Image (cartoon, rainbow, N blue to C red):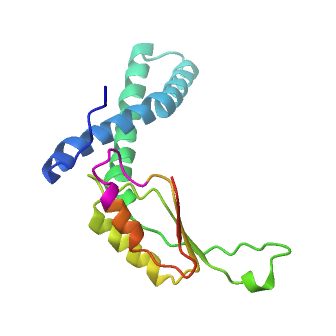
Amino acid sequence: HDALPICRRPSWVTRFVDLPVLVHWCACLLAAFVLFPLFALGGLAGHSALGGAAATSTVVAWAAFTSYAAAFVVSAYGSSLRRHWVRVVHVEVPIVGLAPELDGYRIAQMSDLRIGNFDSKERGLEWAEKVNRLDADLVAVTGDLVTNGTDFYADVADVIGAMRARDGVLVSL
C-alpha cells in the first residue's frame, strides 16, 4: 500500500491551510518540549518564593498560554519570513599541508532547498543564480532537496541543473 502522494496544490491552499497548520504544529512542539517546562518551573518557583499567593493551576495555565503564544510567534516568523532569506557567508578554512594548487579553492555549499509547495522552482532558480554569481570552483548541495513527495523532483533537478561551477555540482541527499 503506497502512501498518498504529496502533489502540487493551489497557492491559496498552501498559504491558508498548509502554512497555518505548519506554524501551529511547530508552535506546539516548541511550547510542549521547551518553553512550557521552563515557564512552568519558573512560575512554580516564583509562586513558592512569593508564599503561594496564586493557585498552582493559575500558574500552570499562565505558563501554558505564554509558552504557546511565544512559540507561535517564533514559529510564524521562522515558517513564513525567515526561511526565505538566503545568506551568503564567506568562511576561510585553513588546512595544514594543503597542496599549493588548492590554495584559494572555493566551494559554494547550499543546504535544504526544500523545493515544493512552499518554495517554488522559480525561487530555487533565483538561489541558483546567486550561487553562480559566486564563481565557485565547486558547488555542494546538501540536505533536503524537496519538501516531500515526488511531484517536485523535476523542479529540483532543473534548479540543480542551473548551478554552475568549474569542477561541477555535487549533491548529497
State which quarter of the image contains the N terminus: top left
Depth check: give the residue in front, 96 or 42: 96
Query: Going 43% across and 17% down the picture, which residue do you hit?
Result: 54
The residue shown at (41%, 59%) is: 113
In the image, residue 23 above or below residue 60: below
Q: Where in the figure is residue 165, as x and y percent of width and height? A: 52, 79
- Residue 70 or residue 19, whichever sits in front: 19
Camera sees residue 55: no
Could you tell whether 155 is left or right of 135 in the image? left
Q: What secondary structure predominates along the stretch shown in magenta?
A: loop
Does the magenta run of residues contain 60?
no
Q: Is residue 50 above or below residue 128?
A: above
Query: In this rendering, would 115 be left or right of 166?
Result: left
Quadrant of res 75: top left
Residue 154 as seen in the image, left or right of residue 140? left
- Start-end of magenta stretch: 145-154
Give the residue displayed 42% in from the left and 55% down from the top: 145
Q: Is residue 52 above or below residue 121?
A: above
Q: Residue furthest right?
A: 97
Q: Position of residue 164 (x, y in %)?
A: 47, 78
- In percent of width and height, residue 37 lies at 51, 26
Give x and y (percent) for residue 68: 37, 33
